[in-house]
Image (cartoon, rainbow, N blue to C red):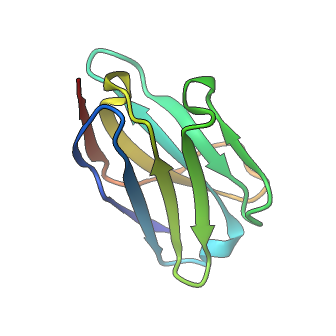
Amino acid sequence: VQLQASGGGLVQAGGSLRLSCAASGRTFSNYDMAWFRQAPGKEREIVATISWTGTSTGYTDSVKGRFTISRDNAKNTVYLQMNSLKPEDTAVYYCASRYRGYNNWGNWGQGTQVTVSS
């Protein structure tokens, strides 16, 4: 499945952004989806995941209560709603997919920059 992320930008601290990741190719509904991010000088970290059914989600501790991952299988799109943004959320955000039942995130989008100013 091919992934195309969008929605990044510059926002002030406390603001909101919604990232989108459009998928094409194979059956989107068979794939778990995730958002990762990588800040300058830091390793890539997983931010949020959503199961192929959409019934199970997970978040890294630093974004719990502020970010929400969701998916619309009819539109082949996964979203990341980011509220109460902080400067430390500044990073390049990537979407990724893995076929259901697999462990490795094998497909990656190109990344979208999110910059939060203080």
Q: Nearer the viewer, residue 17 or 32?
A: 17
Q: State the count of labels.
A: 0
Quarter of the figure with residue 90: top left
Q: Quadrant of residue 64?
A: top right
Residue 57 on image: x %, y %: 72, 48
Image quarter where the C terminus lies is top left
- Rendered residue at 43%/63% (across/down): 21
Q: Which residue is pictured at 36% across the width and 35% down the height?
A: 14
Q: Is residue 28 depicted above or below 97 in this figure? A: below
Q: Position of residue 39 (x, y in %)?
A: 32, 25
Q: Which residue extends farthest bottom?
A: 74
Q: Is residue 46 above or below residue 7?
A: above
| Lateral position of residue 97 relative to residue 31, left or right | left
Quadrant hosting residue 29: bottom right
Judged from this view, the residue extending furthest toward the front is 14
**Which residue: 60% across, 60% down?**
70
Residue at x-position 78% and y-position 53%: 56
Left or right of 64, for residue 3? left
What x and y, as percent, mark residue 113?
25, 43
Residue 84 or residue 46, whichever sits in front: 84
Q: Out of 60 and 27, give the one closest to the viewer.
A: 60
Residue 50: x and y in percent read 67, 53
Query: Which residue occupies the extreme top position in the image?
Result: 41
